[in-house]
Image: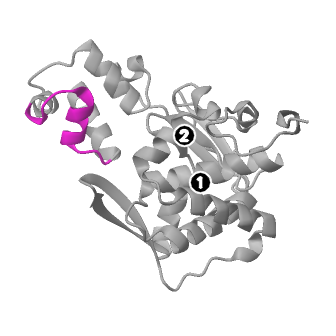
């Protein structure tokens, strides 16, 4: 049943009924009627929901989810294929580096009131893509998917669940200026292993945190929406690193030799 499918999607994304109603331009009681199966969606409402949940309209209406399978390369076990599946393979070395960088981010800025899940997503994205533009080399080299709110690192939830199981972090739900927020609290006993990073990488991460960590989720999402890698990618698909070399002045962080005036 479509109403139950959308209710499941809403809860999976941890969105409130009020938030969805606002995104659709209707009242909360009107939206509740839909979840109860007491009213139908209009076409324009269905299109907005599909965009909100990072889905094609026909997938939403036919109650199909795109499945993203994450395969860490050291694990050779078979991964079951699903309809509309995107396969992501991530080297274990990059996962180890990502874990330590995430620990470092949480230790440095995780306590700031504006830093929740969405802000962390964008910090990771700009750390990775800006480094690639500057040095033509990967730092974490994570895979990011284009969604309505900006780039999303696909390995994030899997690693977060591992960290929770290991008592390395704790998730708390809070609000930031009336907006629901998911925060990640680092176990005080955890110290990032920065030996996995070289001096240039550390300098770059600190630079990104200094310039971006004071921005709220909306401001960082808006900035990512101006970025050519996000603009040039189809909804729900992986974002290509090579597209950083077509950035505009809005988001480019590299000084190119042919831009200099003699």
Give the distance between the C-alpha atoms of the residues marked 2 and 1, in whole angstroms. 12 Å
* Closer to the camera in the image, 121 or 93: 121
User: What predominant SS class does the magenta segment belong to?
Assistant: helix
Residue tagged 2: 224
- Disc number at residue 124? 1
Residue 215 position, x and y percent, is: 46, 54
* Closer to the camera in the image, 58 or 81: 58
Sooner in the amino-acid sequence: mark 2 or mark 1: 1
Name of the residue lying farthest toward the right:
262
Residue 223 position, x and y percent, is: 52, 41
Colour mode? one colour
- Disc number at residue 90? none
Q: Is residue 102 magenta?
A: no
Q: Quadrant of residue 210?
A: bottom right
Lateral position of residue 24 relative to residue 53, left or right: left
Q: Are marks 2 and 1 in contact (CB under 8 Å)?
A: no
Identify whether 196 is placed above or below 143: below
Can residue 63 be seen here? The reply is no
Residue 5 position, x and y percent, is: 28, 32
Q: How many numbered marks, from 0 up? A: 2
SS at badge 2: helix
Question: At 27% from the left edge and 13% from the top edge, which residue is drawn?
Answer: 43
The residue carrying pointer 1 sits among few (fewer than 14), some (14 to 19) or many (20 or more) residues within 10 Å by Cα, namely many
Residue 15 position, x and y percent, is: 28, 45
Q: Give the magenta-colored segment's residue range.
A: 14-29
Question: At 42% from the left edge and 68% from the top edge, which residue is drawn?
Answer: 112
Question: At 32% from the left edge and 38% from the top edge, which residue is drawn?
Answer: 9
SS at badge 1: helix
Question: At 85% from the left edge and 37% from the top edge, which residue is drawn?
Answer: 260
């Amino acid at each position: 049943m479509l109403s139950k499918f959308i209710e499941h999607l809403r809860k999976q994304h941890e969105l409130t009924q009020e938030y969805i109603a606002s995104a659709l331009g209707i009242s909360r009681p009107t939206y509740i009627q839909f979840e109860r199966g007491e009213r139908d969606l209009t076409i324009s409402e269905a299109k907005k929901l599909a965009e909100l949940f990072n889905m094609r309209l026909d997938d939403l209406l036919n109650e199909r989810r795109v499945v993203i399978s994450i395969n860490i390369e050291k694990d050779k076990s078979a991964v079951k294929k699903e309809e509309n599946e995107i396969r992501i393979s991530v080297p274990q070395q990059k996962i180890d580096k990502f874990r330590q960088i995430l620990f470092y981010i949480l230790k440095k800025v995780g306590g700031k009131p504006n830093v929740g899940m969405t802000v962390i997503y964008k910090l990771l994205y700009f750390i990775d893509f800006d480094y690639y533009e500057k040095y033509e080399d990967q730092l974490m080299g994570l895979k990011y998917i284009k969604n309505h709110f900006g780039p999303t690192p696909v390995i994030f939830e899997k690693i977060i669940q591992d960290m929770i199981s290991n008592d390395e972090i704790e998730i708390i739900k809070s609000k930031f200026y009336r907006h629901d927020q998911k925060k990640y609290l680092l176990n005080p006993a955890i110290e990032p292993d920065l030996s996995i990073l070289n001096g240039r990488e550390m300098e770059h991460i600190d630079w990104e945190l200094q310039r971006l960590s004071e921005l709220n989720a909306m401001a960082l999402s808006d900035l990512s929406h101006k970025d050519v890698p996000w603009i040039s990618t189809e909804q729900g698909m992986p974002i290509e690193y090579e597209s950083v070399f077509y950035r505009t002045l809005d988001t480019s962080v590299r000084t190119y030799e042919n831009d200099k005036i003699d």
